[in-house]
């Protein structure tokens, strides 16, 4: 299964693609979609939407996972992040992809073992779990972490469903 992980942001949205086969993960690609800060909010959101659609068209994922919004101290920033997430979710959904959402704490816990891990620890685990990974930008590394989290949780759910089916 090819998975697209997304780390949303209005200025920079990270994306990462992995292939998940049984318990094996393979890095495919990663990068960022950026919006031009000199444009209006509507134009920036359109840039993000077009950029994510282009990534989906190029990478052809089977599913996508996105990091949930955390509420920070600045309500205006949180609102803008929510709007960016909205257009990113829309792009994935209109492309016919299943979309899963994960809290930042769960993503960290799934990779590092603690929900309080810092970005350095997450980056080290991403590179450990995805040999050959070339993610050079923090946003892309975070997106790969989202994809890995989804691979672990989706894989577990599939194994449980298969076991339950055999029992009944």
Image (tube, rainbow, N blue to C red):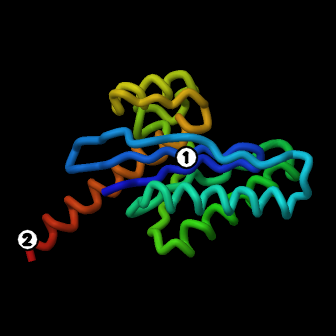
Q: Position of residue 144 (x, y in %)?
A: 47, 41
Q: Position of residue 146 (x, y in %)?
A: 48, 46
- The residue singled out by tag 1 in the image is 15
Label 1 and label 2: CA atoms lie apart by: 37 Å
Q: Judge whether 134 appears above or below 44 on screen.
A: above
Q: Earlier in the sequence, mark 1 or mark 2?
A: 1
Q: Position of residue 68 (x, y in %)?
A: 60, 54
- Foreground label between 1 and 2: 1
Q: Position of residue 80 (x, y in %)?
A: 81, 55
Task: Residue at 71% x, 43% y: name it.
Answer: 12
Left or right, 39 with reference to 130 = right
Q: Residues within 10 Å of mark 2 (few under 14, many from 20)?
A: few
Q: Residues within 10 Å of mark 1 (few under 14, many from 20)?
A: many
Task: Residue at 65% x, 56% y: name it.
Answer: 51
Task: Residue at 51% x, 36% y: name it.
Answer: 115
- The residue singled out by tag 2 in the image is 166
Quadrant for the C terminus, please: bottom left
Under circle 1, the secondary element is strand
Q: Judge whether 35 appears above or below 127 on screen.
A: below
Under circle 2, the secondary element is helix
Task: Residue at 53% x, 43% y: name it.
Answer: 143
Quadrant for the N terminus, please: bottom left
Q: Judge whether 89 appears above or below 94 on screen.
A: above
Q: Judge whether 95 appears above or below 146 on screen.
A: below
Quarter of the image for residue 43 reads: bottom right
Left or right, 156 with reference to 124 = left
Circles 1 and 2 in contact, beta carbons < 8 Å? no
Left or right, 65 with reference to 35 = left
Query: Does the image show residue 56?
Result: yes
Quarter of the image for residue 98 reads: bottom left
């Amino acid at each position: 299964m090819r998975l697209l992980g997304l780390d949303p942001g209005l200025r920079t949205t990270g994306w990462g693609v992995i292939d998940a086969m049984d318990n094996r993960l393979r890095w495919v690609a990663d990068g960022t979609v950026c919006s031009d800060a000199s444009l209006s909010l509507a134009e920036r959101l359109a840039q993000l939407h077009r950029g994510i659609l282009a990534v989906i068209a190029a990478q052809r994922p089977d599913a996508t996972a996105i990091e949930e919004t955390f509420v920070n101290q600045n309500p205006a920033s949180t609102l803008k992040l929510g709007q960016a997430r909205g257009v990113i979710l829309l792009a994935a959904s209109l492309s016919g992809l299943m979309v899963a959402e994960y809290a930042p704490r769960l993503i960290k816990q799934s990779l590092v073992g603690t929900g309080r891990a810092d970005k350095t620890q997450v980056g080290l685990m991403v590179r450990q779990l995805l040999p050959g990974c070339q993610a050079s930008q923090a946003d892309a590394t975070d997106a790969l972490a989202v994809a890995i989290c989804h691979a672990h949780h989706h894989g577990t759910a599939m194994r449980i469903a298969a076991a339950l089916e055999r029992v009944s």
